[in-house]
Image (spheres, rainbow, N blue to C red):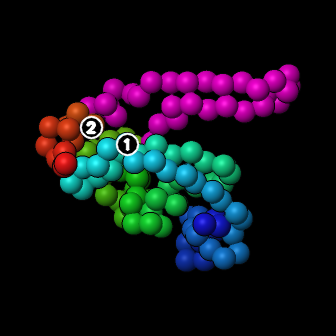
Amino acid sequence: MPIGRSDKDRKKMAVTRKGKNAITHFKVLKRYKNYTYIELTIETGRTHQIRVHMAEIGHPVVGDVVYSNGKNPFNVEGQMLHAKKIEFEHPTSKKRVEFEAELPEYFIKVLEKLDKEEEIK
């Protein structure tokens, strides 16, 4: 879905016909009663791309006060987004670089809480 500046709120981005091409792939890792743990891969790097696309399909990112009407049921600081792996061409050396990081503790705790309370079959 193409993303551009919102016509309704110039401080936000939105899916819009006049926007630039934006491609986000997702894979469901685990479903819960009211939440879904997903893996996302982006082909493009538009501003707020993941947050805008997820809100557009009715599944805003937990903790995203901008694109989810301020809902934050787990009282997390920031969004429940984590860059597990990022790779890009280094601007000076022009070599491909790759970085990986484990989930932060707060993210793991939310997943554990969901596992205990809300897992569905």
Q: Label 1: how many residues lie within 10 Å, few (<14), some (14-19) or many (20+)?
A: few
Where's residue 50, x and y in %?
A: 53, 53
Distance (Cα) linking label 1 and label 2: 15 Å
Query: Which is more foreground, mark 1 or mark 2?
Result: 1
Residue lying furthest front = 121
Query: Which residue lies under the disc numbered 2?
Result: 110
Q: Which mark identifies residue 94?
A: none
**Amino acid identity at mark 2:** Val
**Residue 101 part of the magenta segment:** yes
Q: Residue 7: where, in percent of width, then height?
A: 60, 77
Q: Is residue 38 left or right of residue 83?
A: left
Closer to the camera in the image, 97 or 70: 97
Asked if residue 3 is positioned above or below residue 82 in the image, the reply reads below
* The image quarter in which residue 11 lies: bottom right
Q: Residue at x 56, y 31 (%)?
A: 85
Q: Earlier in the sequence, mark 1 or mark 2?
A: 1
Q: Position of residue 23 (x, y in %)?
A: 63, 57
Magenta residues span 81-110
Relative placement, left or right, of 114 versus 63 is: left
Q: Which residue is mark 1?
A: 29
Query: Tag 2, which secondary structure?
Result: helix
